Every structure is written in structure tokens, then in C-alpha cells.
Image: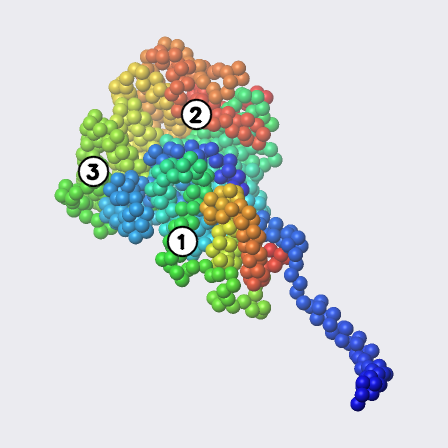
């Protein structure tokens, strides 16, 4: 489980972050190894495939450039490093959406005119990476975010709270609504609880 | 009308209304309506409560987690971005001091900065490799026949052509099936029917593609491995099977078969290191040279010559050897295309003049740019040799060596003035040369382009900074020459075998002279390493001479050659090797160091004397290059000993481990 791997490496991550702040590229390289896959997952489900590579690069560069900010800001009460990295990824993604408005994910109640699913067109599908990506595209941004951070990347509520900027109580409600919205999207794709 | 009259009228009206027949719905119509109503109610979708939906949400959450684990970027993408990021980090650091933080945070400024840096690095191509157009090597299923499955994270996937394989994948073949796997170091594995192979580890260094690790576990069945060339000191190709661990040296072909608790490891080409685990700590740690096999069962190990009496075994070996030849040809062609593409349209003269006139960020960058000219010379020479213009090819190779000599001289000057700068440049050159060494390792003396391999070996030795480094590199070249001699013998090209042996002798003598220049405190570890290697050399030499009872490809018996016989030549070689063995000042016998606690191992004296410059135990502990991690294999602890060679044997013997 990813969260366990980030969680169990919390101390290691913290140590590496301290070294990286001092300009230690080897420590930064190790952080790269630890966070690459979680960040890839975060970006994969939120934008198209071509952009993922560029965004990953930008995220890591920004992490490097802002390391001194992680050290000096928050006045000693700084969030977990993983939350801080995901916050940067979140901001990079927002910038990306602004620059590429056509790729902005649709609101929950926006009619899906991109794909028409009639009962005769519905194909029996299993819930896999590809179908999940299609379903996620139709969710609003906050739902996507909570689903990816909580379930796909398995971050704790405390970490997610730092990334999104909402209280943990709000997160629980958001989490339920996101799952519910996802369920509806999956049903449109012909995936019900009996067929997942 | 008075009040009384109105009241009477109201009473009459109330009475009339009371008695009026009230309309009623017909009974049977009521029934029909009821039926319609309840049908409508039952067909309405009722929104289920959260509690009712909870199992589905829990399942969905769990499914998302599993999908999350499976959503992993390809290793190629990861390495590509890593290389880019690490290349940009120093530039980003410098920019931190130039621009204000607010400008850096601006997206436009950042994009411009990134683009500028990319353009800057693209122009000078600091990290150009001989194969810039190729993607990072991967491991994949090259071909398969019959029913083959891959098990990944518990899911069973039917084999598909060019299916990319990863760490912890298990490949299974059913009856009459065969799977061929191409590994990231260009080695090849062929998995026989009814076999199961687990990929334990696949590693390739992001900036040095010769630094590779392939670790496999053969759980059952049979695996043929063709290791093309391993040039990096840390590269390894390892196959674990019940009771054994086999590690390929440089280049080799070997067969591992494990059936019903019995494992047989056979070295078919060149040599492999085999470690056999026992229930106690008595272990067998030996090098099998081609034509030898070890059989392990019931805690016993027996080393013998390969005598394949079974037609099935003979067919398996000969078919694989044949297929290996085709594969080697294909890889040689692929590498050649890559070299040609790199050098196409490239004017080395222009590059040299450019490097003197253009502005570079540093001297190191200037020298790196010059290296591009060197690469082009190599390709020019290759074309000339192939076209039969050997003399012109040799002239180009002389230029090639001269250009590299200039750079290596520069490195030596910098080593005194600025060691860090020297190290950066030297490592850059060595990494590039290693790639060529790996590509050229498959060239044999019978190939027209063989001089290229010799040139790369000579140039590699040029870059050595210390006598011990030079000695090690020289011995590396000697090993290659000996393997080439062996191959020529097997191919029936005895003249070429003799020529390679002569070169091997000359190289050994050079190494011996260089060893004289090694400082006494360093000599111990170098000589120890040399002794290890000489034992392997002797085994190989004997193989060249012996007539092995082997039903594989024919091995010609030594015969009288003009001037000197092969046997006499081997005598010469043996004499040189013995001189080497006594190169250090010898006073007392050595005790080998084992990774296991001393009480559990039987100390075996080395066949050759030790060095007196320091207590040998201490020397070996500090400097032995043969440290391997403890590992667990099929419930038995495998501890690979630190170099405990037994007396070198000159004929194949069988030895049985005590229980």
C-alpha cells in the first residue's frame, strides 16, 4: 500500500528533506524515487497522458526550487513533507488547467456531451485503470482530488487536509460525496456494484 | 321568508343530501386501480441509504487502492525525467542567486528559464551517448510458443509479444511451450516447457547503462541463459535455483535445470561462478568453465564434465547455441545501426575546431565535446574494416587513440591541479567507453572489425590513474583475449586461437611489469585479485587444451602447429601465470576469510602464498572485492564465501560435499 510506504518512510523522508534543503542532490534524488509514483498517480488521473511527463518535471523542479521555503515557512509547525509536495503538485495542476482551459474537468452536474452512452452502446466493463480514468474525467476537481489522494495514493486525512486546505471533518463529507459521484459515473459506463 | 322558514329549508336540504346516493368507485375498478398504483410504486427507484450502499463504497475504495498500486509510470519515463531533473539542478541553483523569488514563482519566468536551460544543454549535448536515439533498455518477452503466462501481483496475464516484464513477475510455461526473454543488459533467457521463472530484480543505472543487475529465480524447469557481455564491475547476471546460485562472468552461456529436487548447472560457454548451499556451512564456491557441470541433490554437489547422453539434452544445447548465434548477429547489427546513426552527418574535424573557438561553460565541457569527434573516428574505422580496407582502418584507429591520449593526458594534469574536475571528466569518458566495450565484446578474432575491440581495450588502459588500476584493466583485457582464444578453438580456428593466446601472454607480461610499480601497501589487494583471476585463467587454458567428452559443438584436440604447438604455448602461459603468482613477497600461507562466523567454517589454505606486508586476515577483510550479501534460498541460508579457492585443478574432477 502506497500510504504505508510513505508512512513507514516518514522519518527517512524527513531526514532526506533536511539534507535536500541544504542542497544535497543525492538526498533529492532519493526523494524523487520515493515520490515519483505517488505523484505520477496524482497527475495521471487528472490530466491527459501527454501532459503528465511535463507536469512531473515541473513539480520536481518546483520542489527543488522551493525547498528553502519548506524549511523557513510555517514557523516550526510545518505539514508533513508529502503533503507539502502534493500541495505543489496541486498548484502546478491548477496552473496547467488555467493555461489549457479546454482540459478543465467538468462540474458534477454538467451534462456529458463528449460521450453518448445509450443502453445499446454500453459495454460491459470491469473497473480498471482505464475505465476509472474515463469516469474520473467527468467529476469535478475537488472530487477527483480527494479520490486520488485518499484512495489511490492513500494519504492520511491530516496530509490531505494540508494539501486541500479543508478540515478533516469536511474531508469526510467530501470523500463520501466523491464516492457517490464516482459511482454514478461508473454506472453510466455500465459498471455496477455487481460487475466491478 | 322568516328565520323559521330558512331553518326548515336548511333541515330539508341536509336531509336530502344525507339521503343522496354517494358516488362510489366500482369494486372491481378499485382493484384494478390498486394494482396499477402498487405497480408504479414498485417500479420507482428508491434511493438506497448510505448504510445499504456501504459495502459497495468499501469495495470501490478498496478497488481504487488496488488500481492506484497498479498505476505506475514506466521505468523509462522515470529515468528520463530523473536525468533531466538532475541535469537541471545545478543550473536551477545558480539561477536562484540571480533572480528574485517572485520572478521564479511566476509561471512564465519559470517556463522561459526551463526552456533556456534545455536549449543550452541540447546544443552542447553534454550527456550524449553512442545511442541517443534509443530508449532506455527494458526487459521484455521477445517471443513465445505455446501456452505462456505472466503472473503479476497475483493476476495471471496471457503472454503477448514484446510484453514488458518487471521485478517480481513470474513467467510460467506449460507443456510444449517456450518463452524467450530479452533482458535489459541484452542477455537472453530461454525458458523451457513446464517451467517457472521469477524475476527478482532488474536494475540499470540511469546514467551508466553498463551497470546492470539481473537476478532471476528458477523455481522449476529449465532455463538457458546467454549473457552477451558484462563490462561494469558491478554488473551481474544471476540465476538462483534450489540449492544453487549461478552468476555469469563477463560473457557466458549456461544452462540451469531443476527437476524433482535435483539441480544441474552446466557451463556451456566461458565461465560461471556457482555457489552451492548446504545444510551446514560447508559450501561449494567454484567457477565452472565451459564443458563442466555441477549436480546438486540431497545436500551433495558433484562437479563433472558435461556428458550429455540424452538426445533431449543434446538437442536442447545445440538448438540454443544455434539460436544464440542468430541473436548475437542481430544485436551486433542493431548496435552497428545505432553507432552509424550517432555518427551520421557528423564532421569530427569541425567539432575539434569548434571546441577551440566556441565558448564553453568549463574545460570539462570542452573535453566532452571533443569526445564526439572520437566517437565518429571509431565509426569511420568500423566502416573501413568492414569494407576490407584494414590499413586505412588502422590509421583511423591510430587517430582515435591519439585523440583520446590527449584527453587522458589532460585528465592526468588535472588530477594534480583539480582532482574533482579530473574525476568528472574521467568518469564521463569511462562511462562512454564502457558502452563501446559492451558492444564490441561480441566481436571475435575472426571478425573483420575485431581491431575495434582491441583499440577500446587499449584506450581504456590509457585512462588508468594508478598502477593498480592499470593492472586491473590490463588483466581485464587479458581475460577477454583468453575467452576469444577459447572461442576460436571451439570454432576450429586454431591459428586465430594461437594468435589470441600469444596476445594473452604478452598482456599478462605487461600486467606483471605494471604490478611491479604498485606500492607495497596496495600490492596485497591487487595481487589477491590477480590470484583469483589466474585460477579461472588456468581452467580456461586447460579447456582449450583438453579433449572434453562432450556432445556439444566439436572441440578440436591440440595438434602440432608450425613453429610451436598449442601445448607448448600453454606451457608458456602457465609459466607466466606462475611468475605472476609469486609476484608479491611471500612469507606465510593465507587463511581465507568467510562471510560466515569463523566457528562455522572450515578454513582452507590458499593454494598460493600470501603477502607479508600486512596481516593477511586484515588485508583481506579490508580489501577483498568479493563481498556478497547473505541470502536465503529455498529455506537454506546461502552465504557466498569470500574467495576460498581450492587448489587449482588441471583436469575435471568430481567432488562431493559432506552432509
Label 2: how many residues lie within 10 Å, few (<14), some (14-19) or many (20+)?
A: some
Mark 2 or mark 3: name the one nearer the start of the chain: 3
- In the picture shown, does residue B4 fall above or below B152? below
Residue designated by label 2:
B627
Same subunit, labels 2 and 3: the answer reads yes
Corner quadrant of residue B470: top left
* Residue at the disc numbered 1: A94
User: Picture coordinates of residue B107 (x, y %)?
Assistant: 32, 51
Asked whether B430 or B317 is in front, the reply is: B430
According to the picture, the residue beneath numbered tag 3 turns out to be B362
Of the residues tagged 1 and 2, which is closer to the observer? Answer: 1
Q: Name the residue at 40% across, 15% down.
A: B618
Q: Report, in whole angstroms, how far the alpha carbon at label 1 lies from the one at label 3.
A: 39 Å
Tally the marks: 3
Which residue in the rendered view is the most extreme toward the top? B587
- Which mark is nearer the camera, 1 or 3? 1
**Residue A49 position (above or below residue B528):** below
Amino acid at each position: 500500500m502506497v500510504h504505508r510506504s510513505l508512512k513507514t518512510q516518514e522519518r527517512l523522508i524527513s531526514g532526506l528533506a533536511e539534507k535536500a534543503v541544504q542542497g544535497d542532490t543525492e538526498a533529492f534524488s532519493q526523494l524523487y524515487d520515493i515520490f515519483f509514483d505517488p505523484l505520477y498517480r496524482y497527475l495521471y488521473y487528472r490530466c491527459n497522458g501527454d501532459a503528465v511527463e511535463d507536469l512531473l518535471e515541473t513539480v520536481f523542479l518546483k520542489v527543488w526550487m522551493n525547498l528553502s521555503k519548506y524549511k523557513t515557512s510555517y514557523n516550526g509547525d510545518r505539514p508533513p513533507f508529502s503533503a507539502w509536495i502534493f500541495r505543489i503538485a496541486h498548484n502546478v495542476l491548477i496552473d496547467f488547467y488555467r493555461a489549457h482551459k479546454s482540459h478543465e474537468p467538468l462540474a458534477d452536474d454538467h451534462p456529458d456531451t463528449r460521450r453518448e452512452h445509450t443502453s445499446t452502446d454500453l459495454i460491459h466493463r470491469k473497473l480498471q485503470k482505464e475505465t476509472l480514468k474515463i469516469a474520473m474525467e467527468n467529476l469535478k476537481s475537488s472530487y477527483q482530488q480527494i479520490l486520488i489522494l485518499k484512495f489511490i495514493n492513500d494519504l492520511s486525512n491530516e496530509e490531505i487536509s494540508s494539501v486541500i486546505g479543508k478540515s478533516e471533518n469536511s474531508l469526510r463529507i467530501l470523500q463520501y460525496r466523491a464516492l457517490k459521484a464516482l459511482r454514478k459515473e461508473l454506472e453510466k459506463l455500465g459498471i455496477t456494484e455487481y460487475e466491478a | 321568508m322568516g328565520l323559521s322558514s330558512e331553518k326548515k329549508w336548511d333541515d330539508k336540504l341536509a336531509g336530502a343530501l344525507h339521503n343522496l346516493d354517494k358516488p362510489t368507485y366500482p369494486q372491481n375498478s378499485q382493484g384494478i386501480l390498486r394494482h396499477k398504483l402498487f405497480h408504479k410504486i414498485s417500479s420507482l427507484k428508491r434511493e438506497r441509504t448510505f448504510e445499504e450502499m456501504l459495502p459497495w463504497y468499501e469495495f470501490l475504495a478498496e478497488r481504487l487502492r488496488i488500481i492506484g498500486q497498479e498505476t505506475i509510470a514506466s521505468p523509462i519515463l522515470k529515468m528520463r525525467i530523473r536525468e533531466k531533473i538532475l541535469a537541471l539542478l545545478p543550473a536551477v541553483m545558480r539561477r536562484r542567486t540571480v533572480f528574485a523569488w517572485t520572478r521564479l514563482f511566476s509561471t512564465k519566468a519559470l517556463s522561459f528559464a526551463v526552456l533556456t536551460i534545455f536549449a543550452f544543454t541540447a546544443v552542447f549535448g553534454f550527456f550524449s551517448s553512442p545511442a541517443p536515439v534509443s530508449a532506455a533498455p527494458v526487459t521484455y518477452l521477445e517471443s513465445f510458443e505455446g501456452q505462456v503466462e505472466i503472473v503479476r501481483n497475483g493476476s495471471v496475464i496471457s503472454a503477448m509479444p514484446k510484453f514488458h516484464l518487471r521485478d517480481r513477475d513470474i513467467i510460467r510455461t506449460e507443456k510444449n511451450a517456450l518463452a524467450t526473454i530479452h533482458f535489459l543488459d541484452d542477455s537472453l533467457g530461454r525458458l523451457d516447457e513446464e517451467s517457472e521463472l521469477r524475476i527478482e530484480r532488474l536494475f540499470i543505472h540511469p546514467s551508466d547503462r553498463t551497470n546492470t543487475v539481473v537476478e532471476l529465480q528458477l523455481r522449476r524447469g529449465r532455463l538457458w541463459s546467454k549473457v552477451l557481455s558484462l563490462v561494469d564491475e558491478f554488473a551481474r547476471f544471476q540465476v538462483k535455483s534450489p540449492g544453487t546460485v549461478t552468476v555469469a562472468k563477463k560473457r557466458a552461456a549456461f544452462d540451469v535445470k531443476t527437476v524433482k529436487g535435483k539441480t544441474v548447472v552446466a557451463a556451456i560457454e566461458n565461465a560461471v561462478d556457482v555457489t552451492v548451499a548446504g545444510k551446514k556451512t560447508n559450501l561449494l564456491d567454484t567457477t565452472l568453465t565451459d564443458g563442466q557441470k555441477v549436480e546438486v541433490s540431497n545436500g551433495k554437489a558433484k562437479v563433472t564434465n558435461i556428458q550429455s547422453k540424452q538426445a533431449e539434452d543434446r538437442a536442447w544445447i545445440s538448438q540454443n547455441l544455434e539460436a544464440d548465434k542468430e541473436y548475437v548477429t542481430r544485436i551486433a547489427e542493431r548496435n552497428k545501426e545505432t553507432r552509424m546513426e550517432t555518427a551520421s552527418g557528423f564532421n569530427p574535424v569541425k567539432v575539434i575546431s569548434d571546441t577551440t573557438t566556441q565558448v564553453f561553460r568549463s574545460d570539462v565541457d570542452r573535453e566532452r565535446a571533443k569526445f564526439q569527434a572520437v566517437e565518429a573516428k571509431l565509426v569511420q574505422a568500423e566502416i573501413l574494416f568492414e569494407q576490407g580496407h584494414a590499413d586505412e582502418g588502422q590509421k583511423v584507429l591510430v587517430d582515435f587513440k591519439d585523440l583520446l591520449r590527449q584527453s587522458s593526458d589532460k585528465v592526468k594534469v588535472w588530477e594534480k591541479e583539480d582532482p574533482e574536475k579530473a574525476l568528472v571528466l574521467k568518469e564521463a569518458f569511462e562511462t562512454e567507453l564502457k558502452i563501446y566495450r559492451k558492444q564490441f565484446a561480441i566481436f571475435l578474432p575472426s571478425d573483420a572489425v575485431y581491431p575495434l575491440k582491441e583499440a577500446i581495450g587499449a584506450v581504456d588502459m590509457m585512462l588508468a590513474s594508478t598502477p593498480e588500476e592499470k593492472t586491473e584493466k590490463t588483466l581485464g583485457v587479458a581475460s577477454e583475449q583468453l575467452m576469444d582464444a577459447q572461442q576460436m578453438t571451439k570454432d576450429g580456428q586454431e591459428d586465430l586461437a594461437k594468435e589470441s593466446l600469444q596476445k594473452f601472454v604478452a598482456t599478462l607480461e605487461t600486467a606483471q611489469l605494471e604490478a611491479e610499480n604498485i606500492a607495497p601497501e596496495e600490492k596485497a589487494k591487487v595481487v589477491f585479485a590477480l590470484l583469483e583471476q589466474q585460477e579461472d585463467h588456468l581452467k580456461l587454458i586447460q579447456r582449450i587444451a583438453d579433449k572434453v567428452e562432450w556432445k556439444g559443438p566439436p572441440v578440436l584436440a591440440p595438434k602440432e602447429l608450425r613453429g610451436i604447438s598449442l601445448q607448448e604455448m600453454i606451457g608458456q602461459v602457465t609459466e607466466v601465470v606462475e611468475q605472476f603468482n609469486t609476484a608479491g613477497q611471500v612469507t606465510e600461507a593465507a587463511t581465507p576469510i568467510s562471510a560466515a562466523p569463523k566457528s562455522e567454517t572450515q578454513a582452507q589454505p590458499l593454494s598460493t602464498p600470501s603477502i607479508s606486508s600486512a596481516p593477511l586476515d586484515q588485508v583481506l577483510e579490508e580489501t577483498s572485492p568479493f563481498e556478497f550479501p547473505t541470502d536465503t534460498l529455498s529455506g537454506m541460508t546461502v552465504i557466498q564465501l569470500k574467495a576460498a579457492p581450492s587448489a587449482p585443478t588441471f583436469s575435471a574432477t568430481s567432488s562431493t560435499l559432506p552432509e
